[in-house]
Amino acid sequence: MKTLGLDIGSSFIKAAIYDVGSGVCIARAQTPDQEMQILAPRKGWAEQSPESWWEYAVAAIRQVVRQAGKEAEEITAIGITYQMHGLVCVGNDGVPLRNAIIWCDSRAVETGNRMAIKLGREYCQEHLLNSPGNFTAAKLAWLMENEPDVYERIRHVMLPGDYIAYRLTGDIRTTVSGLSEGIFWDFRDRRISDELLEVAGIRKDLLPECVPAFGNQGILRYGVAVELGLPGGIPVTYRAGDQPNNALSLNVLRPGEVAATAGTSGVIYAVTDQLLSDPLSRINTFAHVNHGPDRQRLGVLLCINGTGILNSWLKKNVAAGEGYDEMNHMAAIIPPGSQGLVILPFGNGAERVLQNRDIGCRILGLNFNIHTQAHLFRAAQEGIAFAMNYGLDIMRQHSISPSVIRAGFANMFLSPLFRQTLSDVTHIPTDLYDTDGATGAAIGAAVGAGAGSPEEILGKLKKKMMIVPSSMKGNTTDAYLLWKDFLDKEIKIQIDSL
């Protein structure tokens, strides 16, 4: 049995074909050649074209189909994972009415705060497990207030993965996990939150039909199958946001297990069976892929927006033509702490871990007589790892204390410096596996098609390496304390200026 997985990211669109029997990915592709642009019409805004996602998804699928040859004819199910919290609005003809407002967009923060006040802190914590913040529901409320002509023409709103599934099947659907990431889901009453919709003035009929994360969610349309080079009649049997899907791909399904990613953003994601919420909404709780009425499984998510995007910015603007491998090599020569150079990696919109403040990226302690581009490369990777540990400390306050972190051997985890710094500063081993989002989506498709339980299929998952805290962890801890001191001062300066 072969399955196809799609990963609709904000930097790249990825596709993979997975052989369920052998547990091996037989074809992979990534489009476009350069990272996709995030449009910022105003400071704090972040948009992308849903049509461009589809264009690149078509290209990626065609590539893996060509790689797989005749084996592509054996594909029996499709799975989709996607960048979370985005807002896609389509009219009666199913065509997007505007660019998608994506996950790192900050424009709806104040709208979400007003919604939270009207709903009341107790309701938000006990029912939504989150403040509306700048999640999908708040983005839609912002649109209603600021672009009423667009809002009046909306027939359906979708998450990015819902839109790609719609282009494949013609069916507009979502999941409980998807509704929860948009802050539409009432966990106590196990239904869409009518209270939130009423406070925001959002019409309930805009939301898609809800289907299980695993199972038949629609059939690939014949014309689309021809365009993609696939057999007709293949069902879409799985969809999930990128972080729940990453956890699935790492077999993180049970309470106490923890997954991490470090792509454009950086995430630590812990599974719990408790309705857990942070009063300040610095960490967020959503329905996990295996959440259901008879089994409560939730993902507690810490997100740092500015991780891999910082490394990418340095490559484009500072590295003078050097690639990531050379940047890693240069950074590794610099001692822990970067000789007092500190980078706060918060340059990609409002950070939930900082209570939705947008403090921007900061480069602090720069000395023209000491520091070089290599120091910048190291300070960036340290800053990313330190920011993730800063959030993990908040998770520890909520009794989440992992003994090991699982991650895919991809993105920032390809850097020996980054993965060792993260292990040193957290004092936690990191297990790395040869998997990625598209492969996880293909595995999810196999589960949804009835090929076996997640545990059975993921039993073939093999560990690539373990990173353990090193003898340098004391120096890394000292560097982290300096970093945190700079961050605390920057936050205080911003608060005092209000």
Image (spheres, rainbow, N blue to C red):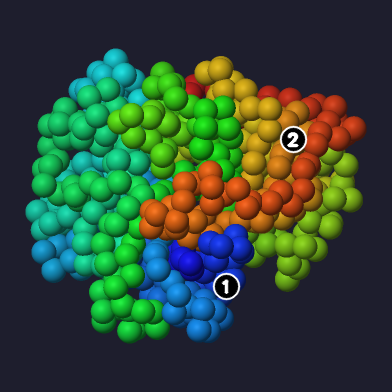
Expressed as whole percent of the image width and height from the top left, the position of residue 44 reads 41, 47
Expressed as whole percent of the image width and height from the top left, the position of residue 401 reads 62, 23
Q: Is residue 467 visible?
A: yes
Expressed as whole percent of the image width and height from the top left, the position of residue 80 reads 40, 59
Kind of residue at badge 2: Pro
Q: Pointer 1: residues within 10 angstroms few (<14), some, or many (20+)?
A: many
Expressed as whole percent of the image width and height from the top left, the position of residue 109 reads 34, 36
Q: Is residue 450 above or below residue 354?
A: below
Q: Is residue 107 above or below residue 441?
A: above
Mark earlier in primary sequence (2, 1): 1
The mark found on residue 150 in the picture is none
Q: Is residue 449 left or right of residue 494?
A: left
User: Under tag 1, what secondary structure?
Assistant: strand
Residue at image position (40%, 54%) is 450
- Label 2 to label 1: alpha-carbon separation: 30 Å
Q: Is residue 399 above or below residue 451?
A: above
Q: Is residue 476 left or right of residue 129?
A: right
In the depicted view, which residue is nearer to us: 203 or 296?
Answer: 296
Query: According to the image, label 1 marks what residue?
Result: 27
- Tell me whether circle 2 and circle 1 mark residues in contact (CB < 8 Å): no
Residue at image position (40%, 68%) is 76
User: What quarter of the picture does the C terminus occupy?
Assistant: top left
Q: Is residue 313 visible?
A: no
Kind of residue at badge 1: Ala
Residue at image position (77%, 62%) is 325
In the depicted view, which residue is nearer to us: 179 or 309?
Answer: 179
The mark found on residue 429 in the picture is 2
In the depicted view, which residue is nearer to us: 408 or 358?
Answer: 408
User: Under tag 2, what secondary structure?
Assistant: loop
Residue at image position (53%, 84%) is 69
Q: Pointer 2: residues within 10 angstroms few (<14), some, or many (20+)?
A: many
